[in-house]
Image: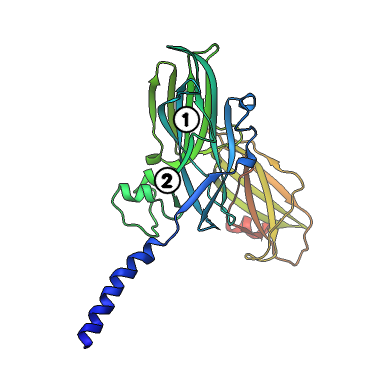
Amino acid sequence: MMKKIFYGLAILMLVFVPTTYASVAPIECSIDLSTCPWSSDESSTWETGAYTLDIICTQGGAPVENYVAEFDIILQKGDPEDYQPIAVLKTFSTITDSNGKAKIKAPLLHIPIEIEWGWGYIHICPFDDIIYVGGSFEELPVYSMQSIGLPKGNFTYDPKCFPWLKKGCCETTITVKCCTPWRVIKYCTIVTQLQCYIGNYDPDPCTSISTVWSPNGYCNYCSGVCEEETVIELVSFKALKSKGKVQILWETASETNNYGFNIYRAENKNGEYVKINSEIIPANGSPTQGASYEYVDTSIKSMKAYYYKLEDVDRDGTTTFHEPVKAVPKVLYDIFN
């Protein structure tokens, strides 16, 4: 009797366990058409260019957070009644927020050209030709991990050992040559080197495609092109206190894409830091040459301790903080240095 019960339970498990896994809803991502600057049924609004589009990702109706969606872009040629695919391009979204929302940069092409049987178009319509095909969570770069045989799951890697897993900027240029003047469209996306189809090829006599990857670049979602990320090589950062003021000094060896600096102050190392400069301190360095800077804080009390953080700001507004320093009496600093 017990054996019959055991075998019966085993059969039930075999029947119901696969059903449980199969019931997990897939992740779905789509373009938010309300954010598009053109109408799908009105070709007069289709202006060729690269556009920043909003997307939303859901799973079973719930928003999906911390997800990077992958889209195929179908480049087509022909007349509107008989478009023929000539290339498949890629774009990836930014990381989805808590509402499942993110952005992609993608081209719209509707360029009239002369074809074998008359006139037609080189064509990409974001309503029909940009297709969600998958993705991965930011802490799990699925494509990269599987390609080098690493197991799925949370994984911390050393960029020195696996440099191809580091994300950079992938920029694609589409050149349409069967028109006067030639039309050139660029769009970018943030991916690993393995996800960027680097190279040059001509899928059609009318069309050339070139893709490059910049390991230290970031995608400017306004311009659609890769720009170098801010790299500050900080040589020194110190704060010297004397006679009712703190002299804040820092020096860089090089500065790439740097717009300027801000100074933040707190009364203990782990306290709340407040910006004390009213205007940004302009950058004076370059990628090949650093600079020396000074800021004097006079709004202090003599018997208090102060901590300062240095913030660098790049040209698109991205910021980076450097480790805080404590204001040291200048006399002691001069004695021990």
Q: Are marks 2 and 1 in contact (CB under 8 Å)?
A: no
CA distance for labels 2 and 1: 19 Å
* Mark 2: secondary structure: loop
Name the spot of residue 38 as percent of width and height, x first. Answer: 64, 32
Q: Which amino acid, by three-letter code, is at mark 1?
A: Thr
Residue 109 showing in the rendered view? yes
Residue under the point 63% across and 32% down: 39
Q: Which amino acid, by three-letter code, is at mark 2?
A: Lys
Quickly name the residue at label 1: 172
Name the spot of residue 222 as percent of width and height, x first. Answer: 61, 35
Q: What is the quadrant of residue 246 in the picture?
A: bottom right
| In front: label 2 or label 1 | 1
Query: Which residue is nearer to you in this view: 212 or 177?
Result: 177
Name the spot of residue 207 as percent of width and height, x first. Answer: 44, 20
Q: Is residue 82 above or below residue 331?
A: above
Residue 174 located left or right of residue 325: left
Name the spot of residue 20 as percent of width and height, x first. Answer: 38, 66
- Quadrant (top left/top right/bottom left/bottom right) for the N terminus: bottom left
Q: How crowded is mark 1: few (under 14 residues within 10 Å), some or many (20 or more)?
A: many
- Quadrant (top left/top right/bottom left/bottom right) for the C terminus: bottom right
Query: Which residue is nearer to you in this view: 315 or 149?
Result: 149
* Mark 1: secondary structure: strand
Q: Residues within 10 Å of mark 2 (few under 14, many from 20)?
A: some
Residue under the point 48% across and 23% down: 81
Quickly name the residue at label 2: 166
Q: Residue most toward the bottom? A: 1
Q: Is residue 25 above or below residue 230?
A: below
Q: How is the image coloured?
A: rainbow
